[in-house]
Image (spheres, rainbow, N blue to C red):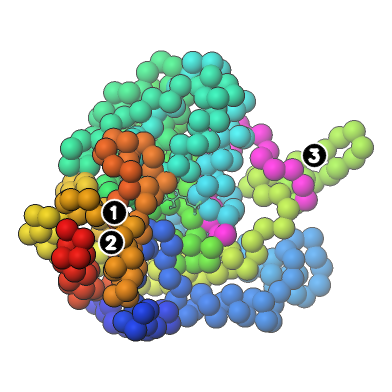
């Protein structure tokens, strides 16, 4: 039985006050709070176990290496990735997608080759492809969303043509919460011989992920949204694709031998992890993922679905609130504006006075803002520890905004 109060007690920050009011943290889409077990693991790693990983022969280096490498298999288990050898650890989704752009895409893209993207991608899954457009003449092929914010998998599949070299698509929109049927896209793209990169930065937080079932070629996650430390993360890469990739960054750890006129690369996935990694961050991420798996991602998804349904029903009764994207299959992420001229920044500032943290801005989704015809929205993004009462507090706060700004 999911006990949200017990879960809340695991997150020390949730008991603090902001501006004299109990914190209502609804900015999980940007970054999630950390449970005590993660904070303790990070402290312990620095206080008792810290040293650099790999190559060391002394006790602390062995402990650090064992813990750090153990996280690779935790990530593989969390994603049902089949093997830890398919996991490259990194600082998060931005690094993961850039790596795919530099190491896999750049050597194989020719002028006119296409990347299929949805109109609701995060800049992390847009800008690396713009680099390919600017530098190599790649063509970005955009697939629009429907009026309700949903993305029809068939419209993505239909956009795949003879020049398409990659589909790069989010599993869940960080602005609208829209969930995409990435499995159907992968199946159809593979029939056409096209690999698929899935941005799992939001999807992995809100639902159980089974990569062997989805069968994508690349799947990027980001640790700080998964209740782990910032600067942690990973990308799953199918072995066939890994074999096609040239190294990304050069330096220590990614090589076996270096001579004046020759280098021999390490075996994958180490071949793609140059330099000292985020040792403690990754150790913290491993503990965060174990914490999530202990509770159960299906349980977390069910709890968040109840928050989504409750918030949806409340918002539908507010005719002065314009919610963007109310598709059936969505995570508990709501973007909205107030009818009239109220700027999302003003709404966010008023809510903050009530202890409610939401984000206001373009949410790193420029093409989506263009599509919606707005420059910014307010976003309330819920997580595993939010409650129905916090939905009510948000609605009360929005009513105050309407009275003050409307
Ligand atoms: N993709 C999506 C859908 C996101 O929401 C984010 C972060 O907001 C990112 C990518 C980038 O993640 P990071 O900043 O952790 O690299």
Q: Earlier in the sequence, mark 3 or mark 1?
A: 3
Mark 3 burial class by Cα count in 10 Å: few <14, some 14-19, many 20+:
few
Q: What's the residue at 56%, 77% (across, down)?
A: 41
Is residue 297 visible in this depiction of the protein? no
Q: Are marks 2 and 3 in contact (CB under 8 Å)?
A: no
Say if the magenta span includes residue 119.
Answer: no
| Residue with the most extreme right position | 260
Q: In the rendering, which numbered label is found on residue 343?
A: 1
Where 256 falls versus 206 (above or below)?
Answer: above
Q: What's the residue at 52%, 42% (across, down)?
A: 97
Viewer-side label of 2, 3: 2
Mark 2 burial class by Cα count in 10 Å: few <14, some 14-19, many 20+:
many
Magenta residues, start to end: 231-252
Q: Quadrant of residue 22?
A: bottom left
Q: Position of residue 224 (x, y in %)?
A: 48, 62
Label 2 and label 3: CA atoms lie apart by 56 Å
Locate the N terminus by quadrant: bottom left
Is residue 96 visible in this depiction of the protein? yes
Residue at mark 3: 264
Label 1 and label 2: CA atoms lie apart by 7 Å
Q: Position of residue 204 (x, y in %)?
A: 39, 55
Q: Are marks 1 and 2 in contact (CB under 8 Å)?
A: yes
- Mark 3: secondary structure: strand
């Amino acid at each position: 039985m999911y006990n949200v109060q017990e879960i809340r007690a695991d997150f020390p920050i949730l008991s603090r006050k902001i501006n004299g009011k109990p914190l209502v943290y609804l900015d999980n889409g940007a970054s999630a709070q950390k449970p005590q077990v993660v904070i303790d693991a990070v402290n312990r790693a620095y206080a008792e176990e810290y040293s650099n990983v790999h190559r060391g022969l002394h006790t602390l280096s062995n402990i650090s290496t064992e813990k750090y490498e153990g996280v690779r298999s935790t990530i593989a288990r969390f994603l049902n990735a089949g093997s830890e050898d398919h996991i490259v650890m990194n600082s998060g989704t931005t690094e993961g997608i850039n790596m795919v752009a530099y190491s896999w895409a750049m050597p194989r893209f020719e002028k006119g080759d296409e990347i299929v993207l949805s109109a609701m991608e995060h800049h992390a899954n847009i800008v690396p492809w713009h680099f390919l457009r600017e530098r190599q003449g790649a063509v970005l092929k955009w697939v629009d969303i429907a009026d309700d914010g949903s993305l029809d998998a068939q419209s993505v599949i239909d956009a795949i043509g003879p020049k398409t070299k990659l589909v790069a698509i989010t599993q869940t929109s960080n602005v609208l919460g829209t969930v995409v049927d990435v499995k159907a896209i992968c199946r159809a793209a593979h029939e056409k011989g096209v690999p698929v990169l899935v941005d799992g930065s939001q999807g992995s937080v809100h639902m159980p992920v089974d990569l062997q079932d989805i069968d994508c070629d690349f799947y990027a996650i980001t640790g700080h949204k998964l209740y782990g430390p910032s600067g942690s993360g990973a990308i799953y890469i199918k072995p066939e694709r890994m074999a096609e990739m040239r190294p990304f960054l050069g330096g220590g750890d990614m090589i076996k031998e270096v001579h004046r006129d020759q280098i021999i690369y390490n075996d994958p996935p180490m071949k793609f992890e140059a330099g000292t990694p985020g040792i403690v961050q990754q150790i913290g991420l491993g503990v965060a993922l174990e914490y999530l798996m202990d509770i159960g991602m299906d349980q977390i998804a069910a709890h968040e679905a109840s928050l989504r349904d409750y918030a949806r029903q409340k918002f539908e009764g507010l005719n002065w609130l314009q919610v963007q994207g109310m598709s059936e299959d969505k995570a508990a992420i709501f973007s909205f504006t107030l009818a009239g001229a109220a700027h999302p920044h003003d709404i966010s500032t008023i809510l903050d006075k009530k202890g409610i943290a939401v984000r206001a801005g373009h949410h790193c989704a420029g093409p989506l803002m263009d599509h919606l015809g707005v420059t910014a929205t307010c976003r309330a993004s819920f997580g595993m520890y939010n409650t129905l009462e916090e939905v009510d507090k948000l609605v009360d706060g929005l009513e105050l905004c309407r009275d003050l700004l409307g």
